[in-house]
Amino acid sequence: MAEYDNSNRIAGWLRESKTGSKYISFNINVDGKEYTAAVFKNEVEEGSKKPLYTGKVAPKGEYVASGPAVEGADEDVPF
């Protein structure tokens, strides 16, 4: 049986911080290197150039979630 190759893949989970802020956490593999990421929803006014979501990426094993400090992180994630 062939060994599973997880290179260049991403997986995400909907999470909630201790303060109740919702975010999506990711495990990412790029060319065999492991990373983690967290993405938070921003409050965006109509016509704004501000992104709907922002986040952080770090090498696996480093803490990336900083939900309470991210504006709009307590809103529901639409998926």
Image (cartoon, rainbow, N blue to C red):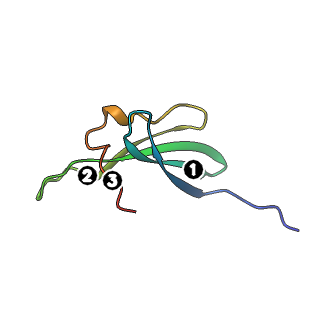
- Give the alpha-carbon distance from disc 2 to disc 1, as whole Å: 21 Å
- Give the alpha-carbon distance from disc 3 to disc 1, as whole Å: 23 Å
Q: Residue at x 84, y 66 (%)?
A: 2
| Residue at the disc numbered 2 | 51
Disc with the residue nearer the chain's start (3 vs 1): 1
* Position in image of residue 33 (x %, y %): 63, 45
Secondary structure beneath dot 3 equals loop
Q: Which mark is residue 76?
A: 3
| Residue at the disc numbered 1 | 28
**Along the viewing direction, whichever of 20 and 2 lies nearer the viewer:** 20
Q: Residue at x 60, y 38 (%)?
A: 60
54 is higher (above) or lower (below) than 11: above
Q: Which mark is residue 75?
A: none
Disc with the residue nearer the chain's start (3 vs 2): 2
The C terminus lies in which quarter of the figure? bottom left
* Position in image of residue 62 (x %, y %): 55, 31
- Give the alpha-carbon distance from disc 3 to disc 2, as whole Å: 16 Å
Task: Report the number of numbered marks.
Answer: 3
Say which quarter of the image contains residue 78: bottom left
Left or right: 41, with 27 as reference point = left
Secondary structure beneath dot 2 equals loop
40 is higher (above) or lower (below) than 47: above
Q: Amino acid at mark 1?
A: Ile
Q: Amino acid at mark 2?
A: Pro
Camera-nearest label, 3 or 1: 3
Camera-nearest label, 3 or 2: 3
* Position in image of residue 72 (x %, y %): 26, 44
Secondary structure beneath dot 1 equals strand
**Tag 2–tag 1 contact (CB < 8 Å):** no
